[in-house]
Image: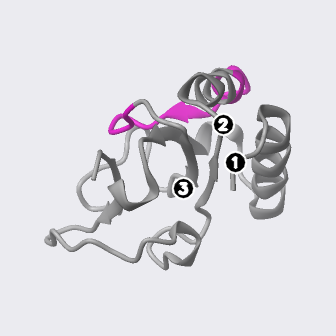
């Protein structure tokens, strides 16, 4: 269900508060559609289930659909302003996803961590 920017921001920030960590430990991105989102784990090319919240590889994952890609961009810009990092595999779309980086990584996710891939299906 599509919701407005302020509701998306509120839900994401509440999710971050519940799961802890600094804003710089969280990654944010967009995708064109939910089916185009997948988790690629080290050594696999496996596509996972289509509902992101059920992912065991990234238990702190949250996703929301904005009305338009422009609205999604506004949410991304706001969250980046708070210190969240832009997912390097993100593509422009109306679906917003946020997940927490593991505490052991210093900067970008590496191949030994679960890595998000956002692509068109």
Q: Nearer the viewer, mark 3 or mark 1?
A: 1
Q: Residue at x 62, y 34 (%)?
A: 84
Instruction: Look at the picture and state if 75 lies above or below 27.
Output: above
Q: Marks 3 and 2, Cα distance to the nearest angstrom? A: 33 Å
User: What residue is at 59 percent from the left and 45 percent from the top?
Assistant: 26
| Residue underneath mark 3 | 103
SS assignment at label 1: loop
Image mark for residue 67: 2
Residue 47 seen = yes
Label 1 sits on residue:
2
Q: Tell me which segment is drawn in magenta.
A: 78-91
> Does dot 3 land on a helix, a strand or a loop?
loop
Q: Does dot 2 land on a helix, a strand or a loop?
A: loop
Q: Position of residue 121 (x, y in %)?
A: 27, 53
Which class describes the residues within 10 Å of circle 2: few (<14), some (14-19), or many (20+)? some
Tag 2 or tag 3, which sits nearer the N-term? 2
Q: Residue at x 77, y 33 (%)?
A: 5
Q: Is residue 39 magenta?
A: no
Answer left or right for 52 relative to 44. Answer: right
Does the residue at mark 2 contact the one at mark 1 (Cβ under 8 Å)? Answer: yes
């Amino acid at each position: 269900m599509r919701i407005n920017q302020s509701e998306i921001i509120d839900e994401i920030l509440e999710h971050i508060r519940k799961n802890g960590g600094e804003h710089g430990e969280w990654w944010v991105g967009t995708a064109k559609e939910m089916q185009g989102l997948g988790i690629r784990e080290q050594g696999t090319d496996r596509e996972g289930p289509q509902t992101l919240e059920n992912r065991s590889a990234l238990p702190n994952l949250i996703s929301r659909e904005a009305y338009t890609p422009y609205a999604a961009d506004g949410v991304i810009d706001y969250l980046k302003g708070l210190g969240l990092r832009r997912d390097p595999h993100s593509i422009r779309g109306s679906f917003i996803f946020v997940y927490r980086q593991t505490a052991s990584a210093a900067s970008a996710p590496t191949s030994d961590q679960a890595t998000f891939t956002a692509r068109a299906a």
